[in-house]
Every structure is written in structure tokens, then in C-alpha cells.
Image (cartoon, coloured by chain):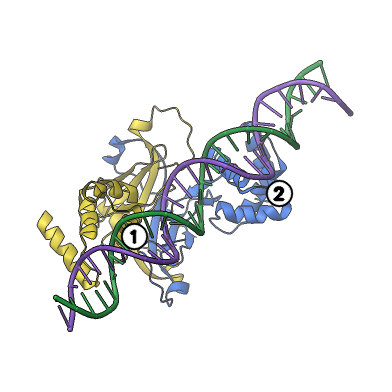
Chain colours: A blue, B yellow, C green, D purple
Amino acid sequence: MQEAEQLDRFFEICRQHNLKITPQRTSVYHALMSAENHPSADDIFQIVKHQYPNITFDTVNRTLMTFTQIGLLTIVESYRGSRRFDPNFEDHHHMHCLKCGRIVDFTSDEFDQLKAPKKLMQKFATVLSSRVIFNGICLECQNKTDKFYRNNKS
Amino acid sequence: MQEAEQLDRFFEICRQHNLKITPQRTSVYHALMSAENHPSADDIFQIVKHQYPNITFDTVNRTLMTFTQIGLLTIVESYRGSRRFDPNFEDHHHMHCLKCGRIVDFTSDEFDQLKAPKKLMQKFATVLSSRVIFNGICLECQNKTDKFYRNNKS
DNA sequence: TTGTATTTAAGAATTATTCTTATTTAATTG
DNA sequence: CAATTAAATAAGAATAATTCTTAAATACAA
């Protein structure tokens, strides 16, 4: 999607949810689209601060949570550290590095098709999404000597 | 495994890692074995406090992190809230309720067999574990009217 | 029984997130 | 193009979760 189209889609979705289109919100959305995978609220805050030096972390974080509520984002599963967001709605799966906390996306048609067992559905009314997660050690971390918790700090 | 056997295994693993067998550690281990699925450090703290009223949260939490390092536990993936632990090393998978944050275990021979795509392995030296995660709304939460973030507080 | 490295309790510090309140502003309407 | 008003923001305090620092206590090896 082109940048202009993306912005139009953003404005459209805000209108659909009666959210005012403020410069701050637009800037947060912009930062998100340009951010590396799975940014934290602070990552986005640092970017937006360049444009709006007076913006507060709370505003950025609240905006991200609002975006999550209206379906512009999801929150990524993690093992600790700060919450991380994901604007990528393409089907995809995650590999976590247990040393550095990096989360790498990958795609798999096979994994996209997995269905929840029927037995499980007796406890759950609705399934909204699914994901396959691998945990391991990335190449960069392989030679580091630091100890690590089985599931480590991000 | 019987309770006595479990304790013996615990002592054995502590010895292997040169960890002293303190009453506090033993109590934390005990609480873990009796806890409901995926307890938080505070859940365990509340249990252990009955036996050791002077124990601090820090001791319990540090002990749990130590147990994680020596492979007695894993940390469960989550979308927010406090860290949750899992002493269950049987292969299993998770369903998260996005409203109440409950995490339900389920088993699946099919899911146990999933292999990371070869392409991914160019970025990762080692794969240690994998899990399939479903997100949805549990039956109990289905009729609640509260708003919720796409991925909600635990 | 003694020595010592480890572990603990206590409390302070840090990190992440959310709340409260007064002010500002987007966007609707006259 | 004002005036109105509900929504959004900034600022700072509050809360929640976790980790650090230090001095005292203790497991256990010798």
C-alpha cells in the first residue's frame, strides 16, 4: 500500500470509530508504519518526539491502545519487558530469541491453516486468531556467553 | 510422579546446579507443584507466605527465575500483566482468552510435530521449543460487556 | 564445629503503565 | 467564519511489576 493510501485508510478508520484526527494520532500512526517490527510504546514515543517534542509517553501509549481497540494493531505475545505492538495483519508467525528477545516474523501457508481442536472449542466461544511460536537462539546471540533465563528479557 | 519423587528430583537438580536446598526454595517448589496453571510470582508468594510469613516477594520471584534458569520451569508467553510461570513440561499448547486473560492448556499430537521452516533456520542457530497459540473469547467472558483490547490484561 | 560462599529479608530503586485534572483542540453547527 | 462542546492532550502523580543493594543469616563442605 502506498503511503497516501495508508493515511487515507487511517483517516477512514478513525472516522468510522468517531475518533478525532489529531496531529498526534497521525504522527503515531506514521511512526508505526515506519517502525521496525514489533515496536514498544517507547520506541514509537522516541520517534514521535522528534516531530512533537512536548508529546507525553502517556499520549503515545494511549493512542497505541486505542489503535489496538479499533483493530489497527495487535499486541505481540512476549515473555517479559515492555508491551510490543504489531501493525502487520498479514498472516504470520513468530520466532523468539531467548537471549536478546528479538522476534522474527515468518510466513507459512501450512501454519496459517491450523484449526483449534473441537474439544477445546467447548471452553471457548470464539477463536479470533492463531499463531505458531518457535523459541530458540538467534545466530547473533549464539556466541554470547551471558546466562539467560529460559525465556529472556526483551 | 509422586510427591516424594518430585521432591527428590528437585533436590537432585539443585545439587546438580550447586544450589543450596533452603526451606524457602523447597516451599516455592512445593507451591508451584500445587498451583493452578500458569501462576504469577505473586500467586506463589501468597501461597508460600502461609508457611513463611516473613518471606519477601523478591525471594519468591528470584527463586522462580532461578528455577527457570535451571530448567524447572518456563515462562509463559503473554500479552501483558505480570509474568506467569509454567511447571508443565509435557508438550502442550495454549488458548488465551482476550477478555479475562485466562490461558488454557491443550494437547495436540499434530501441533507437537510442527517444524520450523528451513528458511527461518538461516537466522536461528537453535530451536528449543515451539507452541501453537489460539486467541479468542472464553465461554465465561462471552456475555460480558466490557470493552477489551485485542489482546487484553491478564 | 567452623569457615565461607550462598541465600535471605528489608527496603530502596527502577521500569512500565495508567490515572487525574486542567487545558486545549477538532470538528460540528449556526 | 465564529461559537460550542465533546474529545483529546500534557503534566504530573499514582500504581504495578520487577530488580537492586546491603547487611544478616544459613546451608553445607571440610
User: In front here: C24 or A26?
Assistant: C24
Q: Secondary structure at mark 1?
A: helix
C22 relative to B6 in the view: left or right: right
Relative image position of residue A46 (x, y in whole percent): 64, 56
Residue B136 against residue B140 in the figure, above or below: below
Which quadrant of the rendered structure holds the C terminus of chain B?
top left
User: In front here: A19 or A144?
Assistant: A144
In percent of the image, x 43 and y 76: which residue is there?
A144
Q: Secondary structure at mark 2?
A: loop
Relative image position of residue B82 (x, y in whole percent): 40, 49
Q: CA distance from mark 2 to mark 1?
A: 38 Å
User: In front here: D19 or B86?
Assistant: D19
Tell me which amino acid carries mark 2.
Answer: Asn
Which quadrant of the rendered structure holds the N terminus of chain B?
bottom left
Which numbered mark, 2 or 1, is in the foreground of this view? 1
Q: Are marks 2 and 1 on the same chain?
A: no
The residue at which mark 1 appears reads as B62
Tell me which amino acid carries mark 1.
Answer: Arg
Label 1: chain letter: B
Relative image position of residue A81 (x, y in whole percent): 46, 56
In percent of the image, x 34 and y 56: which residue is there?
B61
Residue B103 makes an appearance in the image: yes
In percent of the image, x 21 and y 63: which residue is there?
B22
Residue B13 against residue A117 in the figure, above or below: below
Residue A79 makes an appearance in the image: no
Relative image position of residue A72 (x, y in whole percent): 57, 43
Residue A76 against residue B10 in the figure, above or below: above
Label 2: chain letter: A
The residue at which mark 2 appears reads as A54
B3 relative to B18 in the view: left or right: left
Label 1 packing within 10 angstroms: few (<14), some (14-19), many (20+): few
